[in-house]
Amino acid sequence: MPLRTSRPLVRIAIFVSLGLALLGCAGISFPQCGGDALFFSTRGPLGESVQLICPDGAQARTFLASTPTRGFFYAQGWSLNATILVLAEDVPPTPGPIPLHLYLYRPTLGQLARMTMQDGTEGFGALSPDSKRAVYEFVPNGGPIQTELWVKDLATGQELQLTTQTQPRTDDVFPVWRPDGQEIWFLREVFPPDFSSVTITLMRESASGGQPSVVLGPDQAIEGLAFSASGDRFAVSAAQGLEIVDTATLQASVVLPQSAFSGMSFNQGTLFWSADRDLLAFVATVPHTDQQEIWTVKPDGTDLKMIHSENALVMYLGGFAQP
């Protein structure tokens, strides 16, 4: 797979399109999937949006659309009737930098509120399995452009800095909660001075803070991570392809080799595991095109299906959510 050489929050800014904003979203018609639905977001020739789709590819529909003052980049949550974490671009009234902010959104009420008021740029985030906490990427203003991870208690408002960068050109990105809510796993990216390449290490840290430790090293070239419902296994999209790993022993097996994709590459941070269906979903890019495709597959590598395809500059998944 090709190296990704653009840093996460910088990359998001590259794809910002002026002329985007929020539409009223109360009264959304959710897809009837007979179980969970999948969040995905696109930015392409026709603008940007967060959408929902059934795991069989049916009933794709807009969840959050954009108008000239706010554009939506990403959404994640465990239930469509509960809080959804949303990453949005708030377009200023005059030309200038477009800030990225995380919001807490209640779809059934149409309520949208800033999650944190810290002075800086927010990035991708994830709600804890009980939806009481959120972990998120953050770049403070006034310092080096390096991505840290923070955790916020949504009931008390208390915020904890989970990771601190001690070496230059380092980003901690795409955080994932272990299903018991006790640990947060993430990708640590380290760039050379010219940003011509990147090394990626899979890390883990207690959700209450401490010292992070290495799970899998840079030789694995990991792009995405997803836990099974029980947490006894996790999936990674890596150099070898799609792998299932035993959480306790780190014994891995390739269930879908990279050769199965005819040169396609995994999009970073777009691997999710449905507890409802025991199904994996990920995004892959067709080589030398802007064609983005959502694929699903069973954890044993069977029943591989391409369920959705778009011509888009970028596509992300936000995970599975119950109706």
Image: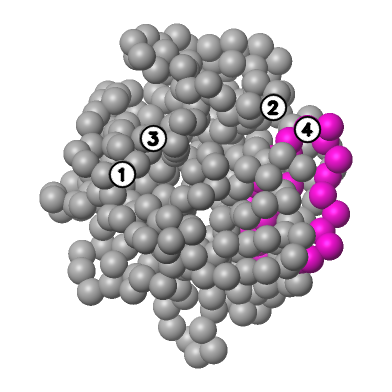
> Label 1, on which residue?
208
Estimate the spatial distance between the alpha carbons at disc 3 and disc 2, rounded to whole Å.
21 Å
Say whether disc 3 or disc 2 marks the residue closer to the N-terminus: 3
Amino acid on which the number 2 mark rests in the picture? Asp
Foreground mark, 2 or 1, reads: 1
Spot occupied by residue 140 in the image (x, y as percentages of width and height):
29, 67
- Between the C-alphas of marks 2 and 4, the distance is 7 Å
Image x and y of residue 36, in percent: 73, 35
Colour approach in the figure: one colour
Kind of residue indicated by mark 4: Gly
The secondary element bearing badge 4 is classed as: loop
Magenta span of residues: 25-52
| Amino acid type of the residue tagged 1 in the rendering | Ser
* Residues packed near mark 4 inside 10 Å, few (<14), some (14 to 19) or many (20 plus): some
Q: What residue is shown with label 3? A: 182
Mark 2 touching mark 1, by CB under 8 A?
A: no
Report the residue at 49% width, 31% height from top: 179
Quick one: label 2 or label 1, which is nearer the N terminus?
Answer: 1
Measuring 53% from the left and 33% from the top, which residue is drawn there?
271
Q: Under tag 1, what secondary structure? A: loop
Which callout, 2 or 4, points at the residue further toward the start of the chain? 4
Q: Which mark is residue 35?
A: 4
Question: Circle 2 is placed at which residue position?
Answer: 276
Which class describes the residues within 10 Å of circle 1: few (<14), some (14-19), or many (20+)?
A: few
Q: Are marks 2 and 4 in contact (CB under 8 Å)?
A: yes
> Could you give the CA–CA distance between mark 2 and mark 1, rounded to whole angstroms?
28 Å
Query: Which quadrant: the N terminus?
Result: top left
